[in-house]
Amino acid sequence: MTTAPAPARTTTAVVTGVGVAAPNGLGTQAWWQATLRGESGIRPITLFDADGYPARLAGEVPGFDAADHLPGRLLPQTDRMTRLALYAAAEAFQDAGADPAQLAEYGVGVVTASSAGGFEFGQRELQALWSQGGEYVSVYQSFAWFYAVNTGQISIRHQLRGPGSVVVSDDAGGLDAVAMARRRLRTGTPLMLTGGVDSALCPWGWTARLADGRLSDEDRPEAAYLPFSADARGHVAGEGGALLVLEDAASARERGAVGYGAITGYATAFDPAPGAGASGGLGRAAEGALADAGIEPEDIDAVFADAAGDPAADREEADTIRRIFGPYCVPVTAPKTMTGRLGAGGASLDLAAALFALRHQVLPPTVHTAAAPHHTLDLVCGKPLRTGLRHILVLARGRGGFNSAVVVSALD
């Protein structure tokens, strides 16, 4: 007897909650209002003495005292990255009006992303090795443990028994985690917490960032990170990000939850090997996300750019946007100029900004920079742009050839 395959589950993934820890605002409302005002959180590093380093600016989350937000017993078990993630997770659940304890026992899962996290934890392990009688865990063990700790700590803190995963794809990870959570919804889990929060603002983490030569050594915050500008000279690193509550639309309606928007399209593509003569993967990721959403380029109302701040990478991204949409044909914004690049947290913070933009029908600005004429970009600069928004494309790239794109759409 032949049995027909079961039909694929169709699910609309709706974002019903957002939690943010960002350099220009702790909490969603403080961050969003600062973003609309064009307020930058890039400033001299205070979390450690950076005077002896060539790069001395970063995006630090202001006013965050973990003791104000977490039980004392958690503090010795966590570092700053995990504490920021726990803050964002709690805010996202509260914003969604979702108490995991009141939902189905195995109905809430978590997928987070990390790229630079673990350095502070690893540094503590090395310091323990150097101190007399200190226990030591190998650096590789500490990183392997740490990449899972955010998901684990969030699950333990909120007693989540659903599926849990961690994505490591550098700065593209914040989008990839959301895509994985979306797939979990399609397999039957009604609610997922997802996104990325990163932090590596410690001496060891800073040394690792300096090693790739991409950090700006400019000491003036307003001149250090100028993506798409003729004066681009690298980027500023930061910490923080956003976590989102992603729900099946039907489940959200049953709860009476109000969504920000829907994740309607996603695709990822790797860059070819150097010297292969093929084009980069960002365009294929963007086109794949549009196809997944079932829309055409002319349906996109705005693009949130990856905005590397590197002249060659900026040119590649601008060329991709021009090829898909045409010169000056779609508003482009990069609010990460107010925060710096946040590792895996940057893409999920851009997703949060896109969702708030859909809700309020306003695009946040790009600050301190203007697009060089040869990029032919309609870059939203200086002040917010109030315009009709239905579909927004969010782009992200990571070292190692990662390229990801997500389409977020307004709810009907």
Image (cartoon, rainbow, N blue to C red):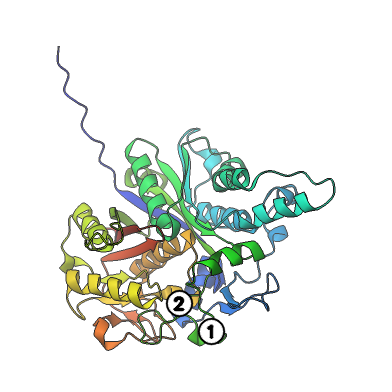
Front-lying residue, 99 or 178: 178
> Which label belongs to residue 86?
none
Q: In which quarter of the image is the C terminus?
A: bottom left
Vertical order, 331 against 279 (above or below)? below
Name the residue at 60% across, 40% down: 156
What label sits on residue 234 in the rendered view?
2
Three-letter residue code for mark 1: Glu
Q: x and y percent of residue 252 in the render?
A: 38, 47
Q: Do the CB atoms of the residues marked 1 and 2 lie less than 8 Å apart?
A: yes
Residue at the (68%, 56%) spot, across then down: 123
- Residue 84 quadrant: bottom right
Q: Where is residue 98 in the image (x, y as percent from the top left)?
A: 49, 47
Identify the amino acid type marked 2. Gly
Quarter holding the N terminus is top left
In the displayed structure, does residue 321 sit left or right of residue 66? left
Q: Is residue 79 visible?
A: no
Task: Kindly indicate the quadrant of the structure image that contains residue 45.
Answer: bottom right
User: Residue drawn at (19%, 78%), measured in percent from left and top?
Assistant: 329
| 392 left or right, relative to 227 | left
Residue plotted at (30% across, 57% down): 273
Secondary structure type for disc 1: loop
Kindly indicate the quadrant of the structure image that contains residue 402: bottom left
- For the residues marked 1 and 2, what is the alpha-carbon distance in whole angstroms? 9 Å
Vertical order, 178 against 356 (above or below): above
User: Measured along the vertical axis of the image, is residue 289 above or below residue 223?
Assistant: above
Left or right of residue 341: residue 299: left
Please provide percent x and percent y for residue 16: 41, 54
- SS class, disc 2: loop
Residue under label 1 = 218
